[in-house]
Amino acid sequence: MTQPFPPAAFPYARPRRLRSSPWVRRLVAETVLTPSDLIWPLIVHDGAEDRVPVASMPGVFRLSPRAAAAAAVEARDLGIPVVALFPHVDAAIKDANGTGATDPDGLIPDCIKAIKDAAPEIGVMCDVALDCYTDHGHDGLMADGRILNDDSLERLAEQAFIQAHAGADIVAPSDMMDGRVQAIREALEANGLHDTMILAYAAKYASAFYGPYRDAVGSAKQLTGDKQTYQMNYANSDEALREVAMDIAEGADAVMVKPGMPYLDIVRRVSETFQVPTFAYQVSGEYAMMQAAIANGWLDEDRAILETLHGFKRAGCAGVLSYFAPKAARLLGG
Ligand code: PBG
């Protein structure tokens, strides 16, 4: 960074000059936030109802494939480039291997097809992890209370293939097994799916802020223990750079930091160190705590939403996943 020399001093420098009216504030703004920066996470379900409210996430609903297609049309009309799908499946189909994750006629392939029919102009991203389909609620396979790394890779690669084959544009492994990006990339290449993008949840921390999501996708009841043997320790930052470097070397096109607001220091380091698009996820717990304060009148909804989302851009994000995406896009004139 170049420093002004000699250093600007009062009264020659008056930083308030550049803030004195809306037009000049706009003129000198260093970053912008537009609907094109937003990824809208959709919770989808295999139940009979079109929309089921999620108690811990006011304003978020579990959507049927038909309702998800309607949401995708809304996203398109608002200028949101991509929706991300997360499944809530009936507990009866959950098992130790997460068999439902690789059902080519399952909920996610159904939703992808419904969305592609209704709004072919936008992208579809899918979460690669077994937690929504396993009876133990973990992202990989489990034996004797341990999460098996290498045995999980084949399942995850098959899940990603099923999604890409059904029409997903981006597969996003969120499982944090070592080597999963490579396993997925090889499976995609081997099947001629050269253009499928991998957005790796590269620096995903073990976090309390996923609580409402686990309620939304119905994995909270199942989950035995925690995910600290595979998700990252929030004491660490250098380790995030090693994780990102590995995922890029294995074939990731873009990377993600997760959760969002408490981890903007990681976003800044990653985006400055690597020349790949960096994303962050303003996760369910961040959404829930803001909605709780908004509902109580303690936060101004519109201003708080735009301020937090803008923070991601300032930290270096190419884009941000947020449950506020449609609301924010509307505020931004989308
Ligand atoms: C599953 C997954 C999680 C989230 C996205 N994918 C939860 C977890 O790892 O337990 C969290 C999203 C959110 O909290 O909004 N691997």
Image (cartoon, helix red, strand yellow):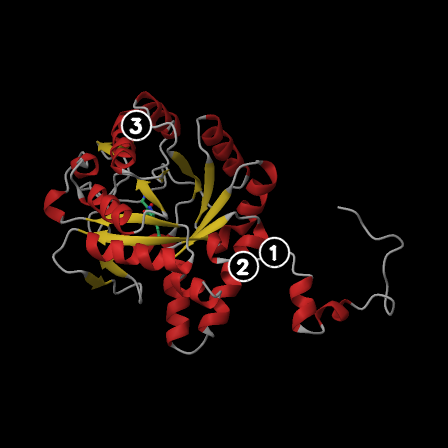
Crowding near the residue tagged with mark 2, few <14, some 14–19, many ≥20 C-alpha atoms within 10 Å: some
The tag on residue 31 is: 1
Left/right placement of residue 14 relative to residue 36 reads right
Q: Amino acid at mark 1?
A: Thr
Task: Say which element carries label 3.
Answer: helix
Nearer the observer: mark 3 or 2; the answer is 2
Q: Is residue 216 visible?
A: no
Q: How far apart are the alpha carbons under marks 1 and 3?
A: 39 Å
Quickly name the residue at label 3: 153
Q: Nearer the viewer, residue 142 or 120?
A: 120
Task: Say which element carries label 2.
Answer: helix
Nearer the observer: mark 2 or 1; the answer is 1
Please tell me in which quadrant of the rendered image residue 155 appears: top left
- The answer to whether mark 3 is within 8 Å of ligand 1 is no
Task: Say which element carries label 1.
Answer: loop
Residue farthest top in this picture: 190
- The answer to whether mark 2 is within 8 Å of ligand 1 is no
Left/right placement of residue 122 relative to residue 70 reads right
Q: Nearer the viewer, residue 25 or 260?
A: 25
Left/right placement of residue 43 relative to residue 37 reads left
Q: Amino acid at mark 2?
A: His
Quickly name the residue at label 2: 310
* Disc on the earlier residue, 2 or 1: 1
Q: Amino acid at mark 3?
A: Leu
Residue at image location 45% in from the left, 76% down from the top: 298
